[in-house]
Image (tube, coloured by chain):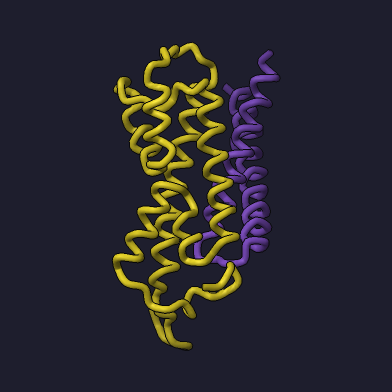
Amino acid sequence: MKTALLFQHVGLFVLLVLIVSVVYNGLRRENVAEIVKVGLQRGLFFVLVSLLVFGAGGYLLAQWL
Amino acid sequence: MSDGGGTAAAAPRLSPITVLLCIVATWVVPGAGHWLLGRRRKALLYFGLIAFTYLFGMWLADWRNVRLDQETMDLYFLGEAVCGGFTLPAWFFTRSLELSFEQPLLDAGLLFSTVAGLLNLCVMVDVYETACPRAVPAEGATA
């Protein structure tokens, strides 16, 4: 149950970050294919970094505490 | 007007009333301002993403996240209200639904719908930037 909730929230986080990234990277760009490509690339990078920092870092911090 | 591929700098100068109309149109329907400015594909992209985010948020919260009767949701409503064309009907048609704070994804739904509203604010700024492009600084000019 806890694992399912965790994956549900991670999925919502990934979806929200990707949507925000695509819209934000569309500002001052005109080519839609480029907007989607750059937005998804940067969004996925942000997701990976934030999951690493907050996920792994939070896990290690919880072990230490 | 061109469809997506043209540069903003090549666009003809628009009157302030037209620019204001495009921004208001975006407030009512996300992407409508870009559509009126001829950026059809970008308009469809923005409409699809923002409408999906807003409605997905409402679905997550069981259609109970657009409320004016909860003090804790006032700021969220402010964010959602930037999507005026969605928020006003959503508030009107769902205001009689009873709110339960035990709804597990109420916070996530609030977040999605509010983020959709804030993204629409960015899109409104982009409409202004598209309609009134800033002058490109000359080569070698210092900031």
What residue is at 63 percent from the left and 38 percent from the top?
Answer: A14
Chain drawn purple, letter?
Answer: A
Residue A29 position by quadrant = bottom right
Residue A63 position by quadrant = top right
What residue is at 38 percent from the left and 71 percent from the top?
Answer: B132
Chain B drawn colour: yellow
Q: Position of residue B110 (x, y in %)?
A: 46, 29
Left or right for A27, reference A39: left
Report how many numbered discs are placed on residues in the image.
0
| Quadrant assignment for the C terminus of chain B | bottom left
Q: Position of residue A65 (x, y in %)?
A: 57, 21
Vertical comparison of B23 with A2: above or below: below
Vertical comparison of B96 with A10: above or below: above
Q: Position of residue B74 (x, y in %)?
A: 32, 29
Q: Nearer the viewer, residue A50 or B69?
A: B69
What residue is at 64 percent from the left and 59 percent from the top?
Answer: A38
What residue is at 38 percent from the left and 32 percent from the top?
Answer: B76
Left or right for B18, reference B29: left
Vertical comparison of B137 with A33: above or below: below
Q: Position of residue B138 (x, y in %)?
A: 44, 87
